Amino acid sequence: MRARGIAVFLGLGLALAAAPAQADQLVREGHALAVKRCGACHATGKTGASPLAAAPPFRSLAYRYPVETLDEALAEGITAGHPDMPSDPWEPADIKRFIAYLNSIGPKPAQPR
């Protein structure tokens, strides 16, 4: 019984240690998606101007609305007021990666005092 308790404890510890690594991987993969799918028009990094002046930098999107709300629009295919915006739907796993990346570069909520 004691060995089983130790094994469960070690397994839980490994799972918790892996969670930040998985989150980091989601962010890296989300960044790659942002560059590949959107980087021709939008600034996809923490600094820099967008190649297309009218395209907002991704780091500023969270100032406009919660980036989590993009999931439905991405799944259905974003439609915008100009013809250059691609409208092909995204896969759910890619949406999760992309939103993880947007959250990593966007404004952070104020910390409670």
Image (cartoon, rainbow, N blue to C red):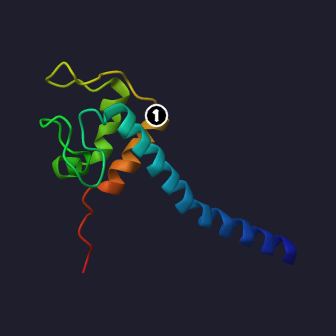
**Count of numbered circles in the view:** 1
Q: Is 30 on the left or on the right of 2, as rendered?
A: left
Q: From the viewer's perspective, is residue 87 above or below residue 72? A: above
Q: Residue at x 30, y 31 (%)?
A: 73
Of 103 and 13, nearer the camera is 103
As drawn, the residue found furthest toward the top would be 83
Of 33 and 51, nearer the camera is 51
Whether residue 1 is visible, yes or no, is no
Q: Which percent across, then down, holds residue 78?
A: 27, 27
Q: Quadrant of the N terminus?
A: bottom right
Whether residue 80 is visible, yes or no, is yes
Q: Quadrant of the C terminus?
A: bottom left
Q: Is 51 on the left or on the right of 5, as rendered?
A: left
Q: From the viewer's perspective, is residue 90 above or below residue 68? A: above
Q: Residue at x 48, y 49 (%)?
A: 26
Q: Residue at x 60, y 66 (%)?
A: 16
Q: Is 9 on the left or on the right of 99, as rendered?
A: right
Q: Is 112 on the left or on the right of 55, as rendered?
A: right
As drawn, the residue found furthest toward the bottom would be 113
Q: Residues within 10 Å of mark 1 (few under 14, many from 20)?
A: few
The residue that disc 1 covers is 92
Q: Which percent across, then down, holds residue 11?
A: 72, 65
Q: Which percent across, then down, holds residue 25?
A: 52, 51
